[in-house]
Structures are given as structure tokens and as C-alpha cells.
Image (cartoon, grey):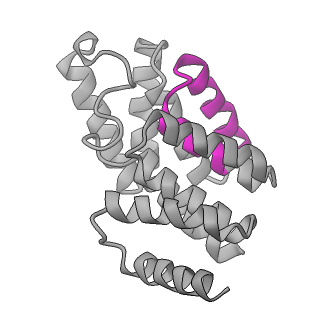
Amino acid sequence: MYYINLIILAALLSSCASSPDTDNQTLSDSNPLEQSDSEISRYKEAITFLNSGKYDAAKEIFLELKSERPELAGPDANLAVIALKNNRPDKALELVKLALTKNPNLAQALNLLAYLEQLNGEIHLAEKHYKEAIKNKDDYAIAHYNIALLYDVYLQDIASAIPHYERYMTLTNNKDKATADWLEQLKNNKDKG
């Protein structure tokens, strides 16, 4: 179970803090025209720091952005990722909930909230939030992967897991060989059962 949690965490964190062109093109899901080039540049720099494990540098920029633009959800969501990476899940939960008060449709924050609920043993709440993330951003590959794992490992609902694994594979252009192999095994076992 620990191994599965690490897989989910790695997928989740890479999605919350992934490159700006896939998840956080702007500081939040607000109108990018309302954001200056400087803000967007600093945000991208913070994402780069976050992706390279330079959490203190990323945190400093996100805190500055949060101070300057307190209405935006993106900085809070990414500060939640940093808190989680620093083994502070309670702080991460607080920050992700704050982000969702600012933008209740931010798929990355919903995905993170789902993962945190899952850590707390709230599997059905996690399922609800993963579904919300997917509803708000159907092309969010990591949310499909995370809910597939939830169905597969925690709920033992293979029939519900398979379509999400398939969607994840489609969205990632079938680049994840381990998941492709696992999906094939699940399909074969389902057909035999």
C-alpha cells in the first residue's frame, strides 16, 4: 500500500506543479489578460523551482504572488504542494481548501484535495474530489490516473478503473509502459472472471 501511495503522490505532485503549458498557464484559471508578463514570468520561475525540488525558492515567489494577488488560487494550490512535499499534510489541506474557496473549479487543487482525503482514509471523499477534478478538466491525465488507482487498489472496482486508465493512456499518448501493461493485465483478468 505504501508503494501505491508513493505512485499516487508522485503523479499528483507532478501534475500540481507541472509545467505551465499543461496545468497552470497562468496564476490561476482567471483571465490571463489580467496578469502582467512579470507575474506570469515569476509564476513560471516558481514552477520550475518546484519541479526541480528547490522548494524554498518556489515558496518565496508563491508567497510574493499571493501577497500581491490574494484573489488568485494558483499560488495557494502550489504552496499546498510544497507543504505536502515538506511532510506537512495538515498545512497542505489548509492551503488547498483556501485555493478552492478562490476557485472551486481548479482541477489541480481538487486533485490534491482528493489525494489528501485519501491519505486521511476518506476514500469516498477522495473519489468525489477526483470526479470533480475530471468534470472540470476532462483532459487532466493525472486525475484519471489517480481515480483509476483509487478504484483499482482501494475500492477493488476494476470495471470503474479500466476506463480511467484508458483515458490516462490516451491523454499521455500511451507513453507509460508500466500502466499499459497493467491495464492489459486487468482487462485480461476481467474477461476471464
Does the magenta segment cover residue 140? no
Q: In which quarter of the view is residue 119 placed? A: bottom right
Query: Residue 5, image x and y in percent?
Result: 64, 67
Q: Residue drawn at (62%, 31%), measured in percent from left and top?
A: 95
Which one is nearer the viewer's eye here, 160 or 117? 160
Furthest residue to the right? 121
Query: Residue 117, image x and y in percent?
Result: 73, 47
Q: How many marks?
A: 0
Does the magenta segment cover residue 94? yes
Q: Going by the image, does 82 lie left or right of 118?
A: left
Q: Residue drawn at (28%, 40%), measured in percent from left and top?
A: 20
Report the magenta residues as a range.
89-115
Q: Going by the image, does 142 lie left or right of 94?
A: left
Q: Residue drawn at (39%, 25%), measured in percent from left and top?
A: 28
**Residue 191 in view (yes/no):** yes
In the image, residue 43 above or below residue 152: above
Which one is nearer the viewer's eye here, 48 or 138? 138
- The C terminus is located in which quarter? bottom right
- The N terminus is located in which quarter? bottom right
Q: In which quarter of the view is residue 176 placed? A: bottom left
Query: Residue 177, image x and y in percent?
Result: 36, 80
